[in-house]
């Protein structure tokens, strides 16, 4: 017991010496960029990415959702819905077609609705289980992002409802 107390007190003495400039702390030099610092070139389109992936495809070329599917997804919500919770969603795999949300808020595939927090836009989607915890974030399909008019690089907070 006496040996344990000695070790603890010795460690405290070493930690307190760090705050007074003692110990093995090393100085780190911080430099600011100047005129000689290499910088990325400005894109011809003013900084907006010209396309997706190595092939330079536009998002619209990857979106296989028909006008009829979009119209059905934008229809008013069903009379009976159950609020499942809120999630933060990023862009899911662009190679998976359809209007879907992969989330930990469901344990089986079901129809549902997502809504922006301000209530300005909502969309019927297929809710797919992610296998992750409910609060671990979600992935939203490319078609859902474009139908809602959201930038593909945005993280979006969504209210999620089951129908």
Image (cartoon, rainbow, N blue to C red):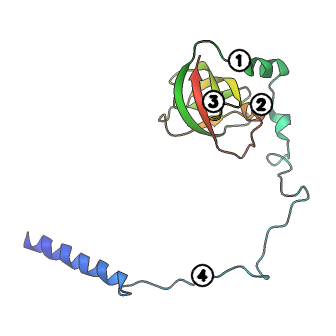
In three-dimensional space, the C-alpha distance between marks 1 and 4, rounded to whole angstroms, equals 56 Å
Mark 1: secondary structure: loop
Q: Is residue 59 above or below residue 72?
A: below
Circle 2 or circle 3, nearest the eye? 2
Task: Classify 10 Å Cα crowding around label 1: few (below 14), some (14-19), many (20 and above).
Answer: few
Residue sticking out furthest to the top: 79
The disc label shown at residue 101, or none:
3
Circle 1 or circle 3, nearest the eye? 1
Percent coordinates x, y for residue 155 in the rendering: 65, 44
The residue at which mark 1 appears reads as 76
Q: Quadrant of residue 73?
A: top right
Quadrant position of the N terminus in the picture: bottom left
- Discs 2, 1 touching: Cβ within 8 Å: no
Q: Quadrant of residue 38?
A: bottom right
Task: Classify 10 Å Cα crowding around label 3: few (below 14), some (14-19), many (20 and above).
Answer: many
In three-dimensional space, the C-alpha distance between marks 2 and 4, rounded to whole angstroms, equals 45 Å
Circle 1 or circle 4, nearest the eye? 1
């Amino acid at each position: 017991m006496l040996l344990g107390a000695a070790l603890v007190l010795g460690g405290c003495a070493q930690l307190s010496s760090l705050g007074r400039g003692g110990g093995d702390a090393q100085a780190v030099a911080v430099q600011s960029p100047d005129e000689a610092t290499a910088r990325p070139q400005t894109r011809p389109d003013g900084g907006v990415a010209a396309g997706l992936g190595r092939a330079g495809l536009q998002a619209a070329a990857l979106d296989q959702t028909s006008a009829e599917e979009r119209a059905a997804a934008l229809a008013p919500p069903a009379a009976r819905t159950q609020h499942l919770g809120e999630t933060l969603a990023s862009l899911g795999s662009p190679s998976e077609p359809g209007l879907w949300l992969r989330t930990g808020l469901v344990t089986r595939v079901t129809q549902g609705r997502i809504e922006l927090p301000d209530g300005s836009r909502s969309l019927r989607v297929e809710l797919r289980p992610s296998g992750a915890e409910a609060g671990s974030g979600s992935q939203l399909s490319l078609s859902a992002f474009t139908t809602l008019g959201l930038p593909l690089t945005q993280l979006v907070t969504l209210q999620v409802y089951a129908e």
